[in-house]
Amino acid sequence: MNNIRIAPSLLAADFGNLQRDVEMVNSSQADWHHIDVMDGVFVPNISFGMPVIKSIAGNATKPLDVHLMIIDPDRYIKSFASLGANILTVHYEACPHLNRTIQAIKAEGMKAGVALNPHTNIKLLEDSIAEIDLVCVMSVNPGYGGQKFIENTYGKVRALKALINEKKANTLIEIDGGVNADNAKALVEAGADVLVAGSFVFNSQDPMATISHIANIANA
Ligand code: DX5
Ligand code: ZN
């Protein structure tokens, strides 16, 4: 049995019933709560900010996997640490001093993640992979839930896995965007360790059963 983690993305939750949806994730087979923060600048969309994350954190019982789609994320590292983020992921494309940003995240006691847009080559992480706890491979263009999975992701994940092995790093590979029961197994076979799923979970008839379904496929 593998240990593939499932991280439902609360971006697709019902914000009018946010506590209910966070509690559903608590009781489910999911491993993490995936929290998407968008600033309307790095990505065209705005999601939610600190008060909403505080409320999620107050109800969540599993690790908070916070994905920052914002420019200049260094400004908020301490705020996310005090909100209770366990993993803080920044975008490669938003960080001119990535090494400094990674060190600052770790200094606050969080795991450091780096997300790559679909056009960003994994080779750019050659000199930093040993420092990175998680790479989030974007399998859609960030900004919205419910988009179509980009097929080029498989090759990218295989190349990233080879780089991680070559450098003897302990980095986890997370896939974010368009993940569902049809591509979950192939993603795990390519090297994925964490699957984020938003609309596939929350738009289903029975989100808790859908989480079990994808977790069972991923870990079969
Ligand atoms: C996209 C976000 C994703 C999104 C995934 O910018 O980073 O986490 O919520 O949603 P689905 O699973 O619907 O593609
Ligand atoms: Zn995300």
Image (cartoon, rainbow, N blue to C red):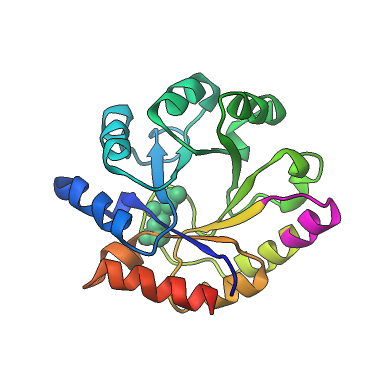
Residue ID at (32%, 35%): 53
Quadrant of the snapshot with the C terminus: bottom right
The answer to whether any part of residue 183 appears in the image is no
Quadrant of the snapshot with the N terminus: bottom right
Residue 217 shown left or right of residue 171 in the figure: left
Residue ID at (66%, 71%): 190
- On whether residue 208 falls in the magenta region, the answer is no
Where's residue 123, x and y in %? 78, 50
Looking at the image, which residue sits at the far left? 16
Where's residue 173, x and y in %? 62, 56
Residue ID at (62%, 49%): 135
**Relative to 220, residue 67 above or below:** above
**Relative to 157, residue 121 above or below:** above
Where's residue 36, x and y in %? 40, 43
Looking at the image, which residue sits at the far right? 166
Examine the image and state in which quarter residue 154 appears.
bottom right
Residue 195 shown left or right of residue 203 in the figure: right
Examine the image and state in which quarter residue 94 appears.
top right
Q: Nearer the viewer, residue 203 or 24?
A: 24
Magenta stretch bounds: 161-171
Residue ID at (71%, 66%): 158
Q: Nearer the viewer, residue 175 or 141?
A: 175
The answer to whether any part of residue 195 appears in the image is yes
Residue 48 shown left or right of residue 129 in the figure: left
Instruction: Count up the numbered dots.
Output: 0
Where's residue 81, x and y in %? 47, 27
